Amino acid sequence: LKTSLVQSSAPTQRGSKATIGQQILLLDKIKELEKMNVEENPASSPDISGWWSLIYQSTPEPSTKWDPNTEVEGPFLSLFKPFTKDVVKSRGNFQEIDVANGKVQNLARFSLFGRLGTFNILGSCSVPEASPLTSRKTRLNVTFDEVTVKVPDYSISLNIPLSWIGPEGWVETTYLDPEFRIGRGDKGSVFVAARTKIDPRIIEPQS
């Protein structure tokens, strides 16, 4: 089922080009995989920590309307997309979770005039106590503290504090194994991610 989900999502550009038919198919597969979850406390499991690569993202139900909360290129590239057109292109979305140290970062790789860069939102995360209604720990609460933008070949390196805004959110992990993860966010997104061994922050200078 996991292999089928990955293969079916491949033509959709991580969900941004998914047709209604593809959305229906993929959401059905996601729901089936969620039913197979055996991890009782995914938010506190050691398996949740590490780098994850986004495979697919969408609204909870099939929709033809664009939603900024499920724009796979992330808030930065979405915001500037009408102005940059083909100048800025998405090169992948990643997330690192470090439950032991209470750290999280959402990183988007992009190219600017053909040169690789990163847009990274860094913050803290915590696992709330289980409620009286359930003993399971599935939720991570997140607060974002800082944004960094880097394009090494253009000597661009920006750090923007977010403490004056203090954006917060949460994500429920509905399926987790050592290599695969499904989550549902507080803004209404559904996403599928796979474990990656690369560190997407590292960009080699291009000749």
Image: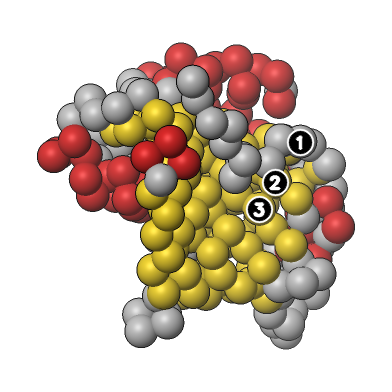
Residue 96 marker? 3
Report the residue marked by disc 2.
Answer: 51
Q: Which residue is drawn at 62% across and 22% down?
A: 6
Q: Distance between the Cα atoms at labels 3 and 2? A: 4 Å
Q: Which of marks 1 and 2 is nearer the N terminus?
A: 2
Q: How far apart are marks 1 and 3 (CA)?
A: 11 Å
Residue at image location 13% in from the left, 39% down from the top? 83
Mark identifier at residue 197: 1
Q: Nearer the viewer, residue 86 or 187?
A: 86
Q: Can residue 31 be seen in this view?
A: no
Determine the residue positioned at 49% across, 74% down. Answer: 145
Crowd class of label 2 (few under 14; some 14 to 19; many from 20; radius 10 Å): many
Taking 18 as reference, is 135 above or below it? Answer: below
Q: Is residue 139 above or below residue 155?
A: below
User: Where is residue 206 drawn, in percent x and y?
Assistant: 50, 25
Q: Residues within 10 Å of mark 1 (few under 14, many from 20)?
A: few
Q: Do the residues labelled 1 and 2 touch (CB within 8 Å)?
A: yes
